Amino acid sequence: MNAFSLVHLAGDQQIGAKVATNDMDLLIFFRDPLTAQPHEPDISALMRLCDVYQIPLVTNLGGAEVMVRALDAGFFDWRNLQ
């Protein structure tokens, strides 16, 4: 598990670099869906990058719980098939 800088402090670039180099199995990215953010384009680009590299991405607590349980149960072995 890693923590990164805030998006507006280049955290999205740090995460994106890990995604692009296949150093990330899962991304849990909490955000406030009810408040417009000035860095929304950066968040959208990060979400697209996860789609391109097939990195599971969740943005809320419910999804995070499911993904952490799946990781604990070993359901991410499919990433090793490449």
Image: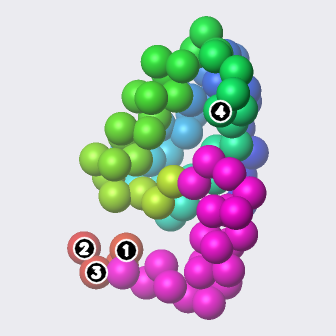
- Number of the label disc, if any, that sits on residue 81: 3
Disc ID at residue 9: none
What whole-number distance in Å separates the C-alpha atoms at marks 1 and 2? Answer: 6 Å
Counting residues from the start of the chain, the first of labels 4 and 3 encountered is: 4
> Where residue 82 is drawn, which disc sits there?
2
Give the magenta range: 58-78
Q: Quadrant of the N terminus?
A: bottom right
Provide the major secondary structure of the magenta segment.
helix
Disc 3 vs disc 2: Cβ atoms closer than 8 Å? Answer: yes
Q: Which mark is residue 33?
A: 4
Tally of numbered discs? 4
Q: Residue 19: x percent and y percent?
A: 44, 47
Q: Is residue 68 magenta?
A: yes
Q: Measuring from the top left, give residue 64's x and y in whole percent.
A: 68, 62
In-image side of 60 versus 79 (left or right): right
Q: Are marks 1 and 2 in contact (CB under 8 Å)?
A: yes
**Can you tell which of label 1 and label 4 is closer to the viewer?**
4
| Vertical arrangement, residue 47 with respect to residue 9, above or below | below
Mark 4: few/some/many CA within 10 Å (<14, 14-19, 20+) = few
What's the residue type where badge 1 is placed? Answer: Arg
Report the residue at 45% width, 29% height from top: 44
